[in-house]
Amino acid sequence: MSKRVKLTTSQALFKFLNNQYIHFDGKETPFVEGVFNIFGHGNVLGIGQALQEEAGRLKVIQGKNEQGMAHAAAAFAKENFRRKIFAVTSSVGPGSANLVTASATALANNLPVLFLPGDTFATRQPDPVLQQIEHFHSHKITTNDALQPVSRYWDRIERPEQLMSALLRAFEVMTNPETAGPVTLSISQDVEGETFEFEESFFKKRVHYVDRIVPSEEALKRAGEAVRASRKPLIVVGGGAKYSLAGNEIADFSRKYQVAFAETQAGKSTVSSDHPYNMGGLGVTGTLAANKAAKEADLIIGIGTRYTDFTSSSKTAFNFDESKFININVSRMQTYKMDAIQVIGDAKAAIQRLDKQLTGYESEFGGKLENYKQEWLDERNRLAAIDVDLDDEGYQPEIKDAFGREKLKNYADTLGTTYSQTTALIKVNELIDPASYVITSSGSLPGDMHRVWSPTVENTYHVEYGYSAMGYEIAGALGVKMAHPDKEVYSMVGDGSFLMLHTEMVTALQYGYKINIVLFDNSGYGCINNLQMGHGSESFCTEFTKSDDSILTVDYAKVAAGYGFETYTAANNQELEEAIKRVKESENSTLIHLKVLPKTMTDGYESFWNVGISEHSSSRQVMDKVKDVVSMRGKAKQY
């Protein structure tokens, strides 16, 4: 008879987590790094007590907001190429409800996080308990059920012995490249502290082997024939290429066959921006070079991409009448997109084997790629040196709309700046150490960074754009720093997103993780204001204005200083240079309050974003834009 050990459910949980390892490319490492927590009555006496008594090698980090600490966990997993994770525990009710946004963000980005929210009593004896919601039609439904549609795997633990099968299933999901994503194990709060005699063998060291999936020879043959038949192929580098560590293979393949490549947000920095055939970001937030190459290409080779609407410009980025597609992905579902030739397998393994089938092949793009890239570099240089002069009648804002010169002058006077956002962003790119990590998520900054940020060190660009979650930027910076404690981390965040969630600044200070926040303040939701006014609408509820229509200003430097950050304010290149210099010298977390003028971000470059627009309006401008949108919709691929 096998040996048994008497433990509470929570004690068994952490004993198991301590003994999970992952094996990839011959290297074996612990899979679970630690546990983020905010304790409440639903988890402090079960999960909390177990962690206090025996956390083992797990790091225990106290969060300040459930959503924030979960974003940090997702960012940590991303920076570790999904081969290290954090668990996240919250109390019942509002605590677990706060996890929903973060779980959805992790799911959209295929990032493994283990969520451990407390739940109501399995016995139902104290009913309803504090923070329990009640439904007339089912007693089984709790707040944690809201996590079901945003979890890759979800389970409820109502008996101690259920923990074993649930954990095995959870780790299979999280360590599988095809299914990697958030897992929720909702544990009834009474069960957390209940004892059971678990089989001792359940806690032995368990290694999860992640083998590279090799595509079938038939699939590779079909792909090879398609490449050899093409004249102007374009590779789309997605997040799956990054997680596969396929950057060197893509770079070599591109040079060898003179094949252009463009990047999704998740794939950017898989290969250095210095590569001669790297055309940069693709799609709605893409560069002129990438979007021109995409329209001319007769073969698209998608590597680890899911072709979001931003990547495909709402399915208008490519010449669908002439182009064929090859999709390389560990997910069979993703390979079917765009009616592609399906190559199911690991990106690195697939490229290595595809290379062997292309002896003597060479793309006909030729010197066009260099011309496209130079044309874009010239545009980037222009964006880096914008000198806004609102008194010059010949000056036009970078985004031409109905905002108006007088309104811009009002913003300039109130904010005390005429600094261009693109000029500031490119200046930051020039000033920081190239080995530093940068992170952003929402607003206009992801678009600007996808276009103008030039990462010359691989895998240093971290943009969450699968869900574009406001509030991810600062919490995510903490997760990135925890993954790279010896590197500088810069969070690029707009004022709107800063206001949404910045509580993990305190966690960074508490545990000594230096993060640097560059806060772009234009007093509003500038990205959505552009979308609104660019489609004929008037500015409405997207600027930060008071009841008398005067512009609201906030001293964000004082906010951060109150927490304990070192803070600086900049409104021009000279002040920014001085601030970055001091940031580099400091050992403490920092914030640069960067004041920028509205309407000075980048515009689209030969791209289209299909968004919902009112097809009936009293506004002539709106109705004019409707015609443009409907026309473009008619040109898009329908499936």
Image (spheres, grey):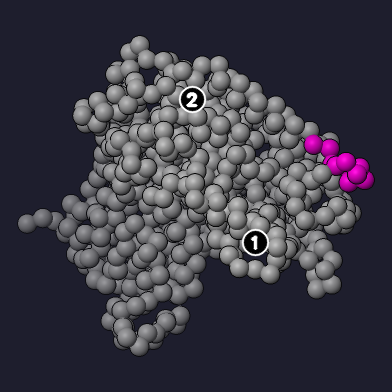
Can the viewer see residue 487?
A: no
Residue visible at 50% across and 33% down? 294
Amino acid at the residue labelled 1: Met
- The quadrant in which the N terminus is found is bottom left
| Separation of residues labelled 1 and 2 (CA atoms) | 39 Å
Q: Amino acid at mark 2?
A: Ala
| Image location (x, y in percent) of residue 490 | 63, 42
Q: Eyeballing the image, is 132 above or below 283?
A: below
- Locate residue 20, reporting x and y percent: 30, 47
The x and y percentages for residue 39 are: 48, 67
Of mark 1 and mark 2, the one earlier in the sequence is: 2
Decide which of 475, 2 is in the foreground and name it.
475
Q: Residues within 10 Å of mark 1 (few under 14, many from 20)?
A: some
Whether tag 1 and tag 2 are in contact, CB under 8 A, the answer is: no
The residue most toward the right is 391
Choose between 564 and 49: the one closer to the eye.
Answer: 564
Give the residue number, with chain letter if any, for mark 1: 623
* Badge 1 element: helix
In reply to whether residue 162 is colored magenta, the answer given is no
Q: Residue at x 79, y 49 (%)?
A: 597
Q: Residues within 10 Å of mark 2 (few under 14, many from 20)?
A: many
Does residue 156 appear left or right of residue 79 in this picture? left
| Residue at 18% across, 52% down | 201
- Magenta segment's dominant SS is loop
Does residue 125 show up? yes
Give the structural element (helix, strand or loop) at label 2. strand
Horizontal relation, residue 116 to residue 398: left or right: left
Q: In the visual, does 349 lie left or right of 107?
A: left
Q: 166 or 542, which is in the foreground?
A: 542
Q: Which residue is mark 2?
A: 260
Residue at far top of view: 360
The residue stretch that appears in magenta: 386-395
